[in-house]
């Protein structure tokens, strides 16, 4: 058999394997939807296209609002059941103050402020399944969930500063994803959203004002007709292949040229500088109790110098008198499939909640 035929047969086998993998993933998606307590979702196997980049961008715009200092915040008054990729029929409600609703119906002034990224906001879980909602139920103290999807660690502290200026809190809890939150604080745009990068300003550090939130390539101005043909081809594959989309979402957060503008600020500070700056700003908040919570993705401490950053966060917080709740050892003892489904599952959030609660007690 000649080389040409060998290559051809290998290509055929590869294509068949990819097709079987694609079908298998789609069947698993249907099975998962049938066990979630909702009606079975058969669109995974009944149609070729499984997602829309335009819908994905528009969805995030729907529950986002432009903010002059923070870049963006959750849109006050948003309330919907999200059946899109990753959410699976979960309810997302944003209250009039821009905080995510906890679903507990607890009245009275909020005494605990929680800030952080999507692990605090509660991506992929319902209102009552976030760890701030759990904390509220367990303590009987009203909690303001001011977490925001995609925020960096310093950006979260900046939101805490703004909220503390507006209201009185007894406790501020800042949750950070150790692996990558502070890298986000070097960026002017990330995933199509403008943000306040931490920059060097003379001999000190400060937050830069967010750039134009409607620049070309942002979620508010996707500009699809200017992307290269190869990028548009990748977009089509992403919309029609669960296998490819899973890989893209895992390793590149869906950066396929559709409303996903990402760029670093030219004067961005280093990650180590940003960590020290953010914790220093947290320590200076006029609040009786400040707490730092260290969270992790499914990869835990692997890669990107996570262990070094974990150590720097812990040592810097200790030098500033900020208690640290490190969830690493607790998470290591759990079944990863029970804890993570991209973000924390409802059970994963309950584990984080109990860990934070133990420290507060």
Image (tube, rainbow, N blue to C red):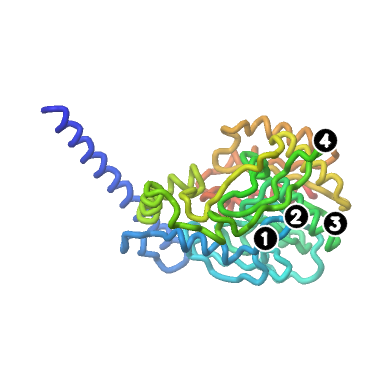
The reply to whether dot 2 and dot 1 touch (C-beta < 8 Å) is: yes
Q: Residues within 10 Å of mark 2 (few under 14, many from 20)?
A: many
Q: On the image, numbered disc 4 is attached to which residue?
A: 203
Earlier-in-chain disc, 3 versus 2: 2
Inter-mark Cα distance, 1 to 3:
23 Å
Which residue, given by chain and number where applicable, does mark 1 sit on?
Answer: 73
Q: Residue at x 72, y 53 (%)?
A: 115
Where disc 1 sits, the SS reads strand
Q: What element does badge 3 sit on?
A: loop
Is the C-beta separation of discs 4 and 1 under 8 Å? no
Circle 2: element type: helix
Marks 3 and 2 sit apart, C-alpha to C-alpha, by 16 Å
**Camera-side mark, 4 or 1:** 4
Of the two numbered discs 4 and 1 on the same chain, state the one appearing first in sequence: 1
Q: Earlier in the sequence, mark 2 or mark 1?
A: 1
| Residue at horizontal 59 percent and vertical 50 percent from the top | 348
The total number of labels drawn is 4
> What residue is pinned by disc 2?
159
Residue positioned 69% across, 69% down in the render: 95
> Residue 109, position in %: x, y?
81, 67
Choose top left, top right, bottom left or bottom right for residue 100: bottom right
What secondary structure is marked by label 4?
Answer: loop
Residue 281 visible in rendering: yes
């Amino acid at each position: 058999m000649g080389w040409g035929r060998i290559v051809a047969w290998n290509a055929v086998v590869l294509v068949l394997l990819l097709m079987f993998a694609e079908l298998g993933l789609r069947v698993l998606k249907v099975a998962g939807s049938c066990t979630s307590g909702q009606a079975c979702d058969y669109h995974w196997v009944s149609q070729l296209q499984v997602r829309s980049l335009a819908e994905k961008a528009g969805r995030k715009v729907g529950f986002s609002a432009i903010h002059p200092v923070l870049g963006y915040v959750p849109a006050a008054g948003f309330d919907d059941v999200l059946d899109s990729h990753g959410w699976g029929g979960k309810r997302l409600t944003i209250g009039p103050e821009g905080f995510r609703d906890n679903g507990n119906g607890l009245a009275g002034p909020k005494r605990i402020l929680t800030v952080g990224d999507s692990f605090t906001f509660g991506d992929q879980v319902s209102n009552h399944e976030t760890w701030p909602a759990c904390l509220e139920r367990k303590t009987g103290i009203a909690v303001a969930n001011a977490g925001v999807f995609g925020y960096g660690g310093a950006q979260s502290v900046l939101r805490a500063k703004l909220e503390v200026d507006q209201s009185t809190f007894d406790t501020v809890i800042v949750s950070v994803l150790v692996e990558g939150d502070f890298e986000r604080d070097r960026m002017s745009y990330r995933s199509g959203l403008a943000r306040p990068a931490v920059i060097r300003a003379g001999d000190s550090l400060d937050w830069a004002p967010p750039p134009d939130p409607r620049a070309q390539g942002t979620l508010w101005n996707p500009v699809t007709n200017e992307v290269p043909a190869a990028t548009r081809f990748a977009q089509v594959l992403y919309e029609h292949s669960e296998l490819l989309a899973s890989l893209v979402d895992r390793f590149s957060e869906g950066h396929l040229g559709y409303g996903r503008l990402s760029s670093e600020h030219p004067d961005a500070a280093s990650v180590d500088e940003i960590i020290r700056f953010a914790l220093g700003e947290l320590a200076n908040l006029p609040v009786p109790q400040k707490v730092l919570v260290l969270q992790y993705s499914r990869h835990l401490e692997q890669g990107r110098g996570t262990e070094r950053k974990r150590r720097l966060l812990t040592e810097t917080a200790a030098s500033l008198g900020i208690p640290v709740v490190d969830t690493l050892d607790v998470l290591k003892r759990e079944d990863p499939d029970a804890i993570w489904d991209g973000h924390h599952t409802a059970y994963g959030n309950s584990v984080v909640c109990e860990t934070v609660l133990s420290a507060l007690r």
